[in-house]
């Protein structure tokens, strides 16, 4: 008989003026640790971003702690469940940006694209006049995206402005009449990417409200335009419709998502290498990774969690 999932995951972000964000660090970390909640939360003067997970009662207490701050009272987490802990430690980090784009004059609190509800997103995708751009990184896009979306093939979000600069169809005054729709995992990157397009003078810029996660949560599979899985930054690695954990694992050497085909490759060595990175590690590095994997497996036999098993992204 199946048991109910034990761990509640809450992905959240909000752009809001937090001049005292440094003073928020210690109380927030203490609240998470006191309630056995793990994950990563980023604090900056422009707002908060991150994902936490743990027992439902603990996660609810942390969310209540955040909502008690009037500036965060409208925070709307995206929730999902798993039967294994998605995170192995708790981190609260102070950052210059809660999602790094390195365009200092940009302010998503002032202007962003038009929000499109998940239920209305398919109609936008079907419009031949709309340019749909996936703003995520290459290792995320490789396992799933919306049919017909453009993949910028970027390694980090900070590369997006340069990619946009290199697109002839998006240059010049005439191009500013182009309809542009952008999407990302949870919505936060699109707050900045659509703000960037508006700052550049584009009139019609759209943004999938709540990101891919909200779409997969609300849109039934039989009506979905999504193909594949959605990469997530925790031990689930990927989720599908209904936000159910997917079949992917993570290469512990390069953090690339691995499906059955990659794991069947002769270049795949669990914890050491995969087809993406097998030729990018020295023999000494591979030996160190192999030892780490051995320690992880020994810890599993003992019923412990080895620190080497955690995600680094």
Image (tube, rainbow, N blue to C red):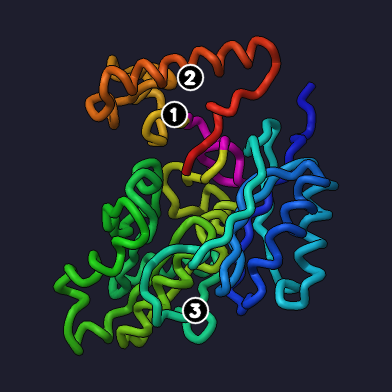
Q: Does the magenta run of residues contain 244?
A: yes
Q: Does the magenta run of residues contain 184?
A: no
Q: Main secondary structure of the magenta part?
A: loop
Query: Disc 2 designates what residue?
Result: 292
Left or right of 73 in this view: 210: left
Q: Dividing the picture into quarters, in which one does residue 273 lie?
A: top left
Q: Which residue is at the front of the view, 132 or 293?
A: 293
Check if mark 1's residue and mark 2's residue have beta carbons within 8 Å: yes
Query: In percent of the image, x 31 and y 57: which residue is there?
Result: 148
* Residue bounds of the magenta highlight: 235-249
Q: Going from the N terminus, do you reach mark 1 or mark 2 first?
A: 1
The mark closer to the camera, 2 or 3, is 2
Disc marking residue 108: 3
Secondary element under disc 3, as helix, strand or loop, is loop
Q: Is residue 288 positioned above or below 33 on the image? A: above
Q: Which residue is at the front of the view, 212 or 293?
A: 293
């Amino acid at each position: 008989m199946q048991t109910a999932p034990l761990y509640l995951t809450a992905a959240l972000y909000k752009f809001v003026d937090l001049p005292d964000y440094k003073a928020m660090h210690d109380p927030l970390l203490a609240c998470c640790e006191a309630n056995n909640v793990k994950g990563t939360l980023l604090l900056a003067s422009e707002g908060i971003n991150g994902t936490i997970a743990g027992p439902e009662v603990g996660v609810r207490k942390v969310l209540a702690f955040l909502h008690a701050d009037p500036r965060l009272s409208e925070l709307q987490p995206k929730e999902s469940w798993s039967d294994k802990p998605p995170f192995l430690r708790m981190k609260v980090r102070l950052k210059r940006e809660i999602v790094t784009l390195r365009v200092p004059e940009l302010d998503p609190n002032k202007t962003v694209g038009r929000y499109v509800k998940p239920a209305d997103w398919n109609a936008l995708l079907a419009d031949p006049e709309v340019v749909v751009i996936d703003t995520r990184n290459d290792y995320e896009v490789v396992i799933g995206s919306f049919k017909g979306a453009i993949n910028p093939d970027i390694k980090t979000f900070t590369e997006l402005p340069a990619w946009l600069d290199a697109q002839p169809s998006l240059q010049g005054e005439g191009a500013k009449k182009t309809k542009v729709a952008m999407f990302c995992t949870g919505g936060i990157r699109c707050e900045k990417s659509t703000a960037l397009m508006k700052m550049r003078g584009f009139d019609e810029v759209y943004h999938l409200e709540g990101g891919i996660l909200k779409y997969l949560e609300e849109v039934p599979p039989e009506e979905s335009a999504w193909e594949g899985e959605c990469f997530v930054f925790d031990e689930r690695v990927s989720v599908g419709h209904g936000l159910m954990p997917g079949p992917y694992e993570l290469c512990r050497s390069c953090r690339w998502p691995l499906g059955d085909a990659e794991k069947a490759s002769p270049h795949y060595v669990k914890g050491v290498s995969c087809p993406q990175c097998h030729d990018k590690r020295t023999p000494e590095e591979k030996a160190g990774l192999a030892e780490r994997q051995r320690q992880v497996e020994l810890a599993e036999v003992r019923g412990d969690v080895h620190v080497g098993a955690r995600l680094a992204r």
